[in-house]
Image: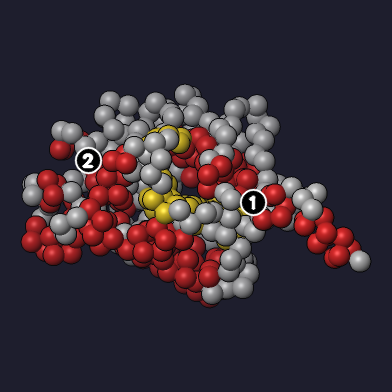
Amino acid sequence: MKKLILIAAIAIGILPASAQKHQTQNVIIVTLDGMRWQEVFRGADSALISSNFTEDKEEVRKKFWATSAEERRKLLFPFLWSVISKQGQLYGNRDLGNKDEVANPYRFSYPGYNEIFTGFPDKRMNTNDPITNPNMNVLEYINKQKGFEGKVAAFASWERFPQILNKQRSGLAVYSGYVDVNKPDANERIKYLNELQHNVPHYLGDSTRLDFITYEYSKEYIKQFKPRVLYMAFDETDDMAHAGNYKSYLERAKQEDGYIKALWDMIQNDPVYKNKTTLLITCDHGRGEKPLDSWKHHGAEVAGAEQTWFAVIGPDTPSSGEVKTATISYHKQLAQTIAQLLGLNFEANAGHEVGDAVTSVMK
């Protein structure tokens, strides 16, 4: 009888549209630190390939160059442009008039991640130092909701995320830098990764582990612990850009696209996640474009460093592909977007503002 009443209520429109259609039960968030929108939508940059910033120019051209932007971007980001472009949405192609930006004035990592997860471009967060973030973040909020307790985790290559996400206050599972997964029931693969990450060369220094390790941890954690929200933060694109190594910047971007594809394929073959999971991919800030060497940099004084992008795919997101409308979105809107994809409303009890959700990502 209850089932018949429910069906009747949906049929005559008594239940709200969100209750009738909402399918997302899990969210995976991925960030590619400092990845420019220019490469995402245009592919490899011919000026940078021809410059002193690129070694092995002919090899790079063979791997990443094609005559059209559509061909080039698919060579660089095959998952974005063969799967998300058909089944999801991509925002931030300024060549089409669609803009995505950070709202914070600083345009570097800590302020960018604070904005994404707190929905608030806090002018106090003008640092990459290990300062504990006073603002409540959306992962912390979700972790306190019924059915999500202990089901939210973050894996990051850069060591700063325990402060950005205020692990001490939030109680979130945050594994960043060279922090081990210290769960006593961790499987043998995770225990092996705990050992491996300390033994591989620290090419990125002692504060940032290889993105491969971050990906492997995330994958194994999903397999064993079935989190409902997982955040995976890559870093190497930013490192290679700061080093002025355009070849490695492109190679790391393609590699991370491959990690994301493998993760998506895995969850789509897992009945816990299949057709119940939304994936959101973005970055923390943009980079410069002109003069040419400004691609290495970002920050308040770098023109274009506020210009960003994001992509979404999931059961509640219309498959409209590349968004071509002349609108502008801000990263302060992503926290509420993540919450509403899960049927929640992010309310920051610390009293700070929260940007409105990007409602076009939901049916």
Q: Please tell me whether residue 92 is drawn above or below residue 271 in the rendered image.
A: above
- Among the 4 quarters of the image, the one containing residue 303: top left
Q: Amino acid at mark 2?
A: Lys
Residue at 22% in and 40% down: 296
- Secondary structure at badge 2 equals helix
Residue at 35% in and 59% down: 81
State which tag comes first along the sequence, 2 or 1.
2
Which residue, given by chain and number where applicable, does mark 1 sit on?
Answer: 342
Is residue 92 or residue 11 the one in the foreground?
11
**What's the coloring here?**
secondary structure
Q: Is residue 238 visible?
A: no
**Pointer 1 local density, CA inside 10 Å: few below 14, some 14–19, many at least 20:** many
Which of discs 2 and 1 lies nearer the camera? The answer is 1
Residue at 35% in and 33% down: 306
Real-space CA distance between mark 2 and mark 1, rounded to the nearest whole angstrom: 36 Å
x and y, in percent, of residue 356 in the image: 57, 34
**Pointer 2 local density, CA inside 10 Å: few below 14, some 14–19, many at least 20:** many
Q: Is residue 69 left or right of residue 8?
A: left
Q: Please tell me whether residue 337 is drawn above or below residue 184 in the rendered image.
A: above
Q: Residue furthest right?
A: 1
